[in-house]
Amino acid sequence: MGSWRLPLISIGGVLALVNACGGKSAQHVDAGHAGTPAAGAGARGGTNASGGMPASTGGAVSSPDSGEGGAELGGRGGRVGRGGRDPISGAAGAAGLPAGGAVATGGEGGEGGPVAVGGDGGAIGGQVGEAGTGGSLECGDCSLPGEMCVVGVCDFELGRCARAPVIACQSGDGCCPPGCAADDDADCTSFRVVLAPSYSGNRSEDGALGATTFTGVMEQQHFHAFFVFDLSGIEGTVASAELDLYYDEYLSTDAVEHFFVRTVAAPTEALLDTAARTDVFDALQSGSYCFDTAMTSEHVGSTVAFGLNDDTLAELTATLGSSMAFGIVADATPGDLSSVEGIRFSDGVTPPLERLTLIVEP
């Protein structure tokens, strides 16, 4: 049995995570505006029209605002980079060199490497790329003293520093990233709770209660599956949560089966009522949206983890001390080649392998 994780995707994708607590992508921050241009600066820097010889009167800065420009040396010499501000802190650099730093020495007609973040721009400085064709850019010191849960990293393509969130659960760094708790990161005050289903089953379109967690179509009737988790004895605020689904059996002639997962407003007593309850069948497909994804026959025997969104986290927090149920509804229609079309997550005999993992702030 494999265990693997995927980000959530919509219809047509395969097993993707949806998460309210997903991390933000790192953003590259351009260098700030420059100061006063160097004496004799051209409108946008001189260029050598004939190529091969350095420009005679090229200005270093195009304008006092942009900090762009600079002469190109040789036919296609290096360009002056942008500078003047720390690209991470945003602090203006000390006076001294004009913004933009030095020009790469490209040789006569050669292609010099463009300048990285340069100038006297603060702690995160830049260096000049190597002359010639190619040559990767380098960053200066990208460290961020005093910053928690954020690190400075070098973007070697742009030759400048950028921010990136800390994602590793590691004690002693002063950071508790999403998904971490005190059991794997001593910097966290949150605790982790892993729950197996207390009840599971399905409801058919005519309201009958079934033992398996099959969802789909069988003998011209639709079925919705459900899992119930006991949240009694848990107090606090749910900071993040993950629902693990085990794919027990794929019952379809189609290449892909798509399904939705929603919270269930019906109480546990109604879910387990042995009487025919069409209202419970309807409740399993009308709760708050958690995520949707797809399954293929290749996923049988695998457990897949899905991050739960902010609305679901709020519902979990409000339900702490009682129970939470999730309904699973497949987009199945009767197939031409089979009277059965759908997915089964557990067989109703062996204990289900589904798990609900909560990170709770006390």
Image: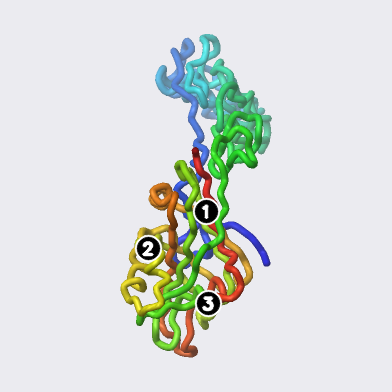
Q: Quadrant of residue 350?
A: bottom right
Q: CA distance from mark 3 to mark 1?
A: 27 Å
Check if mark 3's residue and mark 1's residue have beta carbons within 8 Å.
Answer: no
Question: Going from the N terminus, do you reach mark 3 or mark 2 first?
Answer: 3
Nearest to N terminus: mark 3 or mark 1: 1
Secondary structure of the residue carrying numbered label 2:
loop
Q: Are marks 1 and 2 in contact (CB under 8 Å)?
A: no
> Image quadrant of residue 348?
bottom right
- The residue singled out by tag 3 in the image is 255
- From the image, tell me which residue sits under label 1: 242
User: What mark, if any, has residue 267 been given in the picture?
Assistant: 2
Give amino acid for label 1.
Glu
Residue 322 lies, in percent from the top left, at 43, 54
Q: Is residue 134 visible?
A: yes
Front-most of 314 and 64? Answer: 314
Q: Marks 3 and 2: CB-CB under 8 Å? A: no
Give the class, few, some or many, for how many residues have Cα within 10 Å of label 2's Cα (few <14, many ≥20). few
At a point 39% along the width and 67% down the height, the residue shown is 269
Q: Residues within 10 Å of mark 3 (few under 14, many from 20)?
A: few
Q: Amino acid at mark 2?
A: Pro
Say which residue appears at 67% left-offset and 35% top-offset: 135
